[in-house]
Image: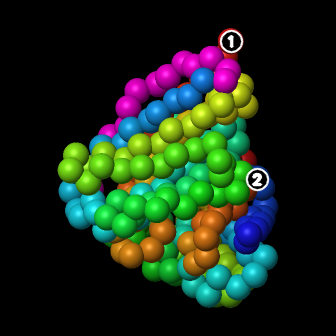
Amino acid sequence: DIQMTQSPSTLSASVGDRVTITCRASQSIRRGLAWYRQSPGKAPSLLISEASVLENGVPSRFSGSGSGTEFTLVITSLQPGDFATYYCQQYDRFPYSFGQGTKVEIK
Amino acid sequence: QVQLVQSGAEVKKPGSSVKVSCKASGGTFSTSAISWVRQVPGEGLQWMGGLIPGLGGALYARLFQGRVDITADTSTHIAYMELHSLRPDDTAIYYCARGDRNDWRLEFWGQGTLVTVSS
């Protein structure tokens, strides 16, 4: 099975900051990587798929990059609603595993 | 627009089973990829398994293999997840999620169903 490792586990930041979250796969997943945001008490929502393609309606302050085993989510100019937990998920190979999550909290 | 509406919260005894439903509207149910995802309170997301309703033949993650059944009824557009031999550590929110782009990215999510296992 493919293991997905996110870093950091927790990140403290302020409104307006730029933050970077990394996701590493234990073997190549090509570009089969999605990023989700989960606000407290809510279901996750899809932000980015195919490693770098923003879903409709997702603000341009979100961007994704990478391929193979190394992927990055960048949020420029953090907004109040962005304080949440972010998960990567590989959907290239069964079973379709998640990273452990990165909590972005207010500094 | 695709919507997924799940059944309500459940309280179950250890050793029993629970069956959670997920009713879909919009899109093409039979060719979508429906997944079930578990989230223990305060923890991360676990992909449990999934199926494409028109094809049948669910796939299961190793952790849940043998204890979970995922099915779907293409006439009612409802997917089901049944978890057997419940333990207290199965207490979690169970989400259904769906992808409509011929792969297993999770574009649409249900609201989640809290299953509490307690004696």
Rendering coords of residue B93 (x, y %): 56, 36
Q: Relative to A104, is A31 above or below? A: below
Q: Relative to B52, is B90 above or below? A: above
Which residue does the numbered mark 2 point to in the structure image?
A10
A57 or B9, nearer to the observer: B9
Q: Any mark on residue B119, and which?
A: 1
Where is the N terminus of chain B found, in terms of image quarters? bottom left
Q: Amino acid under label 2?
A: Thr
Q: Residue furthest top?
A: B119
Whether residue A43 is visible, yes or no, is no
- Report the span colored magenta: B1-15
B100 or A52, nearer to the observer: B100
Q: Residues within 10 Å of mark 1 (few under 14, many from 20)?
A: few
The chain letter for the residue carrying disc 2 is A
Q: Which residue occupies 40% across, 61% down?
A: B56
Q: Any mark on residue B35, and which?
A: none
